[in-house]
Image (cartoon, helix red, strand yellow):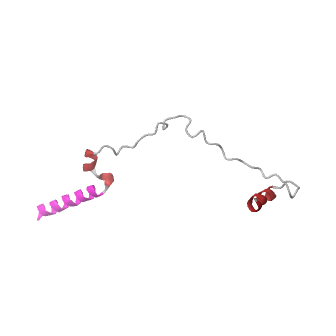
């Protein structure tokens, strides 16, 4: 009885360990390609510096209905 319970417990723990691929110890021993690959620029000082900053457009009021930003956007959207 005790041996049977111990055997069932051992089988259960083996199933738990082999069921999770992150904890699959048998496969890790045979395969070593599970390493995290590093990029060539991971340790660079100036990483992500080539990105341009977002353009900040100031809303300048133009007292002319044909030169206003609204009119230009409207013409681009509906006329062209």
> What residue is shown at x 83% (from left), y 55% (from top)?
68
Front one among 58 and 12? 58
In the displayed structure, 54 sits above or below 1; it is: above
Q: How many marks?
A: 0
Q: Is residue 16 magenta?
A: yes
Q: Is residue 15 magenta?
A: yes
Assign the N terminus to one quadrant of the image: bottom left
Farthest residue toward the top? 45
Does residue 40 appear left or right of residue 53 in this picture? left
Front one among 5 and 48? 48
Farthest residue toward the bottom? 1
> x, y (%) of residue 76?
75, 57
Main SS category, magenta section: helix
Quadrant hosting residue 72: bottom right
Front one among 55 and 10? 55
Quadrant hosting residue 80: bottom right
> What residue is shown at x 55% (from left), y 38% (from top)?
47
Quadrant hosting residue 15: bottom left
Farthest residue toward the front? 80
> x, y (%) of residue 77?
74, 60
Does residue 29 appear left or right of residue 77 in this picture? left
> x, y (%) of residue 29?
26, 45
> x, y (%) of residue 21?
32, 54
Magenta span covers which residues? 1-19
In the displayed structure, 8 sits above or below 25; it is: below
> What residue is shown at x 43% (from left), y 40% (from top)?
38
């Amino acid at each position: 009885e005790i041996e049977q319970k111990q055997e069932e417990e051992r089988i259960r723990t083996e199933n738990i360990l082999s069921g999770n691929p992150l904890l699959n110890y048998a496969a890790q021993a045979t395969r070593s390609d599970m390493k995290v690959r590093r990029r060539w620029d991971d340790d660079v000082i100036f990483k992500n510096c080539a990105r341009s900053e977002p353009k900040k457009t100031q809303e300048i009021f133009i007292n002319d209905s044909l030169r206003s930003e609204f009119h230009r956007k409207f013409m681009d959207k509906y006329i062209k």
